Amino acid sequence: RRHPRRIIITGGAGFIGSNFVHYWCDRYPEDRVIVLDALTYAGNLRNLESLEERPNFRFVQGDICDRLLLDALLKQEKVDAIAHLAAESHVDRSILSPGAFVRTNVVGTFTLLEAFRHHWEAHQKPSHYRFLHVSTDEVYGSLGSDDPAFSETTPYAPNSPYSASKAGSDHFARAYYHTYNLPTLITNCSNNYGPYHFPEKLIPLMCINILLSKSLPVYGDGQNVRDWLYVEDHCRALDTVIHQGQPGETYNIGGNNEVKNIDLVHMLCDLMDELAPDLPVRPCHQLITYVKDRPGHDRRYAIDASKIKTELGWTPQETVAAGLRKTVQWYLDHPNWWRPLLSEEYQAYYRKVYA
Ligand code: NAD
Ligand code: TDX
């Protein structure tokens, strides 16, 4: 029988974090779930709205760099697992201001590992404790069109301040296993999409701009390739790794869905034309505009997810066609979620990137 857990989910008010919190609370109602989130521009309490009445749920606004807070929380809540999703996550912001990425992703992850190590040692190193570090395929760098997909043994070659900071945090999570035996696990996942995705990222940005009849900015020649995974599939993979993964191991997670950016934007336009026939600009493909490329823009990401499939039995379930349809419909149905996010700060950011 499964032992109920007392888990901290960092970054639980963000995109993947909030999807993961909903997933975990539905799946394991007997667990105590503590969300720790600083509520930066990317954190949004509305993502967790319906959970506030749940007796086993607690939200704490706080910073993962705050060691005193972490120590108190781990002790008070008798935490036995951390799913670490808090991060600065947007590549374009990392190009504009990399400092925040070093602070949260590197120093924050280190601080969390240190706090969890001391907590684990103070309780005589229970073997069921787990620290899941959630990371990205971007740490492996960029692939050419004929290169084999990233595997767990692909050398790290980060190209953006974001991926460099994630690479640093991965190395700390790994080192804590090898040096202290702390039961850490690392996952490296491809591009997620789905509900609660912040407007700055490609898919929500295109959906929202179509709804506002604004131009659809495609970087460079639009031929960059990303592998897309529906966020719920990612949540299920993280659950699988926490419960069945081998401490000290890394697992790649991917959707087996490589799509060129320009093709993806066309798919979104097709879906919008179909699902929102009353929009003023139709067909919305005419809004597509090529803009200057992102510096250091990785050409292609692809994930070889055979390890998590053969060792732990996880495979993605959603197809891109069905997942994108659900996602477009979600943005159509939730203007009250995304409109307030287009704040002054966001507009200033937008002007800088798309100047
Ligand atoms: P997000 O930007 O939507 O959310 C990040 C959350 O972390 C926000 O709620 C924010 O308030 C919080 N946060 C930021 N700094 C903090 C700090 N110092 N202390 C506490 N909380 C802080 O990010 P996301 O897209 O949900 O990504 C979650 C994790 O998954 C990240 O570690 C990211 O690197 C990783 N990842 C994301 C993707 C993707 O496609 N989005 C793919 C692979 C891996
Ligand atoms: O306006 C845009 N135009 C455009 O062409 C934006 C925002 C993006 N793009 C391109 C850049 C990428 O090739 O689309 C692709 C996807 O861009 P993002 O949504 O910014 O994602 P990406 O840079 O691939 O990183 C994402 O996946 C891996 C997440 O933001 C990371 O947190 C995750 O680690």
Image: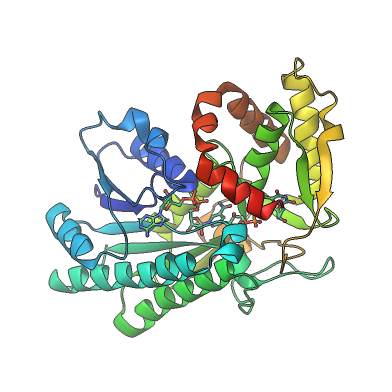
Q: Is residue 152 left or right of residue 2?
A: right
Identify the residue shown where x is 63% and y is 79%. Answer: 155
Q: Is residue 255 visible?
A: no
Identify the residue shown where x is 25% and y is 28%. Answer: 53
Identify the residue shown where x is 81% and y is 69%. Answer: 144
Q: What is the x, y in percent for residue 45?
A: 37, 37
Q: What is the x, y in percent for residue 125?
A: 20, 72
Q: What is the x, y in percent for residue 28?
A: 32, 40
Q: Is residue 197 visible?
A: yes
Would you identify the image quadrant in which residue 243 lies?
A: bottom left
Reply above or below: 70 against 39: below
Q: Is residue 133 left or right of residue 1?
A: right
Q: Is residue 29 left or right of residue 297?
A: left
Q: Can you tell me which quadrant of the image ligand 2 is in?
A: bottom right
Would you identify the image quadrant in which residue 124 lies?
A: bottom left
Q: Is residue 273 left or right of residue 325?
A: right
